Image (tube, rainbow, N blue to C red):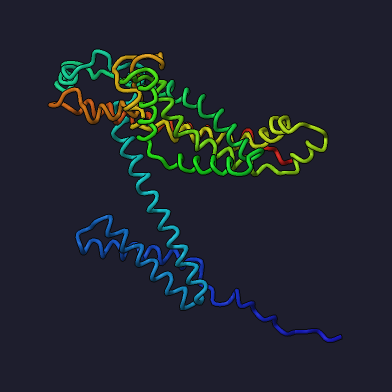
Amino acid sequence: MTVDTRIPAVSSLAQNQLPRATTPVLLVLSLAAGAGLSAALGFSWAWFAVFFIVLFAVVNTTVSGVVEGRRKATDKLVTTLVYTAFGLALIPLISVSWSVVDNGLERFGADFLTTSMRNVTGLNDQQAVDGEAEFIGGAYHALLGTFLITGLATLISVPIGLLTSIYLVEYGRGRLARAITFFVDVMTGIPSIVAGLFAAALFAVLFGVGTRNGFAGAVALSVLMIPVVVRSSEEMLRIVPNELREAAYALGVPKWRTIVRVVVPTAISGIASGVTLAIARVVGETAPLIVTAGFTSSINSNPFSEWMMSLPAYVYSQAMRPLSGSVPEPSFDRAWAAALTLVLIVMLLNLIARLIARLFSPKTGR
């Protein structure tokens, strides 16, 4: 019996491989070279980032091309560009987050969230700056107004958006369905101020010129919410397998009951997430609420009567119209604290959307 003693050929994919430590070493060298070049021009973080990225991309791609070939070099170049784009996208996010936290954390607290601007004047701010009194004035009335207005907008938008998406997926055919889809797409891109002007004009016709209240603001926000709810719900309903519908029909279940008992429960996770994200999308809208709900320094718990403050309008009013022109710092501090509150609300809504998606998602395990 003859034994084959030949050494098997090494696969071409395993040949000409750079050591694993090559990329980290080139990364450190590029960092050092970028810092040196930037220091030669008078150190700047912007120039340092530019020099580092360019040097690392060129050196890493060149070394890989010489040793590993063109395919590997192209892969590393594209990988570097992707990570660079990711880092650039993070810069404004981190910058905004840091600015809001750094400027708003000092004034943010229980006192800020539980008091309003009732009877707060520029004299109070002047006395607080001079050390003769404590800083007063909070955003409770704006926080309450935001919750009431957004809640009403949700009650208006969710039924309309969900029923519209059910019609488009389950019943819609022909010109009417195409027209609805077209107008939903148009509504998705309209500026928010247009929604505010529409609601203001509608209430002016129905109840008189100058009518401003929380419900008008809710109508304006619902104009912005409805297309988002329709689009997200429509996509979730379309991914429900047709086999589930056909199985229900085979058992003699009517179509409406199939939709209520089979289709919607299957897609409820995505629908709930889409609704929550739609709320997060409109909770920070400023322009529609300025022209529909107005400004007030008092607590108003009735959205159908009188002007109602909201957090976005509160930030605008404190930043653009300080109570004391000579001492604007207290108003700016309140604006930053309200902005931090708004950011926390949006973050909480996004976390709730993820939690809903996880809790209500269909269980596929056995």
Given residues 165 and 114, the one toward you in this image is 165
Vertical placement of 264 versus 31: above or below? above
**Which quarter of the rendered picture does the C terminus lie within?**
top right
171 displayed left or right of 149: right
Image height of 191 relative to 144, above or below: below
Q: In the image as oriented, which residue stretches furthest toward the bottom?
A: 2
How many numbered marks appear?
0
Relative horizontal placement of residue 209, taking residue 277 as reference (left or right): left
Res. 131 image quadrant: top left
Q: In the picture, residue 1 is in which quadrant? A: bottom right
**110 or 322, which is in the foreground?**
322
Residue at the limit of the structure toward the left, as seen here: 326
Q: Residue at x 51, y 66 (%)?
A: 20
**Residue at the farthest right position:** 1
Task: Please give the name of the residue rendered at 53% of the width and 35% of the height, measured from the top-left corner.
Answer: 229
Q: Mark yes or no: residue 347 visible.
A: no
Determine if residue 365 is in view: yes
Q: Residue at x 68, y 42 (%)?
A: 240
Identify which residue is drawn at 44% across, 35% down.
281
User: Foreground: 242 or 353?
Assistant: 242
Q: Position of residue 109 (x, y in %)?
A: 34, 23
Spot occupied by residue 211 in the image (x, y as percentages of width and height)? 34, 19
Q: Is residue 302 left or right of residue 315?
A: right
Q: Position of residue 50 (x, y in %)?
A: 31, 61
Q: Is residue 80 above or below residue 297?
A: below
In the visual, does 278 lie left or right of 358? Answer: left
Q: Position of residue 279 (x, y in %)?
A: 47, 31
Determine the image quadrant of residue 172: top right
